[in-house]
Amino acid sequence: MAKHRTRGSDRPRDKLRVGGPAAWLHDEPRFRGALRRLDARGFGWDDVASEILPVFERARPFSHPVDPPALTVLPPGVTVGFGVDAGPAFMRISTAHLGHWPVDLAGLAARALGNLARRARDADGRDLLRDSVADVPVVVFQSHDGWASTTVLLPDEMDRLFGARPALFVAPSRDLLIGLPVDVDPEFATWLTEEFEAADPNALRLEAFEWRDGTVLCRPLARAAVAI
């Protein structure tokens, strides 16, 4: 895929100037407040239910032992975990938490999607950046609240934000969703995705999402095979 490597302002991270985790540093008081609240009251359902969001699991494993995450599969057929929004980070929800809460996995997913939908309704066209990379038009969405990638779980919000025109979306990071022409070269889409993934220590490793006729469908990227 070297043919897609460009120079100067055409490098996607430079041209789009998409912020990473550092863009959330202004939320540090919110993060510290959330930690104090949870330390004082416990990680109980009533404490965190309104802040739970669906999250895609990061590609890199944690460097320390952690409990297994609570995972489920949601349309369009993608594995989703859950996190408690604490400002500049998500505190992941494990199977151990779920075992002590008055909801099952389906109830957790429903609450998380409802919370996400309420937040997504605050986004509008002013949150979209339209530009091009190597002459390919792109539209970039960041929520600045950590959940942009999971917009693909909400077809109504995809339609409202991006319109009905078919497109291909990639989500390299939790707060980054990039729209491309639906007929884009798969190798270009893969290169663009992996450029952003390489810059984010908490990057995702998802395939692409096709948006067509009010429906989101999973579509493979042209990733190199990973040796097992």
Image (tube, rainbow, N blue to C red):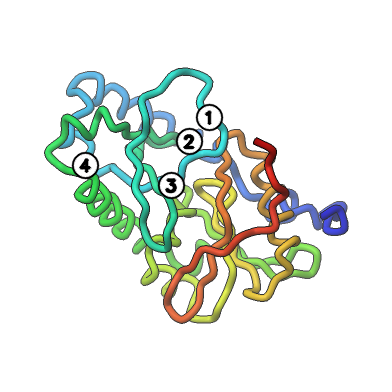
Q: CA distance from mark 4 to mark 2?
A: 24 Å
Proximity of marks 2 and 1: CB atoms separated by less than 8 Å: no
What amino acid is found at the position of numbered circle 2 in the picture? His
Mark 2, secondary structure of its residue: helix
Q: Which residue is mark 1?
A: 61
Disc marking residue 145: 3
Q: Pick the residue in front: 220 or 13.
A: 220
Q: Earlier in the sequence, mark 2 or mark 1?
A: 2
Q: CA distance from mark 4 to mark 3?
A: 17 Å
Q: Which residue is mark 4?
A: 49
Q: CA distance from mark 2 to mark 1?
A: 27 Å
Q: Earlier in the sequence, mark 4 or mark 2?
A: 2
What amino acid is found at the position of numbered circle 1 in the picture? Pro
Quadrant of the rendering where the C terminus is positioned? top right
Q: Pick the residue in front: 2 or 159.
A: 2
Q: CA distance from mark 3 to mark 2?
A: 11 Å
Q: Earlier in the sequence, mark 3 or mark 1?
A: 1
Q: Pick the residue in front: 215 or 146.
A: 215
Mark 1, secondary structure of its residue: loop
Badge 3: few (under 14), some or many (20 or more) residues near its Cα, within 10 Å?
some
Q: Residue furthest front?
A: 228
Residue at 87 percent of width and 53 percent of height: 7
Q: Pick the residue in front: 24 or 149.
A: 149
Mark 3 or mark 2, whichever is nearer to me: 3
Q: Which residue is mark 2?
A: 26
Q: Residue furthest left?
A: 102
What amino acid is found at the position of numbered circle 3 in the picture? Asp
**Could you tell me residue 140's position as x and y percent?**
59, 61
Quadrant of the rendering where the N terminus is positioned? bottom right
Q: CA distance from mark 3 to mark 1?
A: 23 Å
Residue at 42 percent of width and 49 percent of height: 79
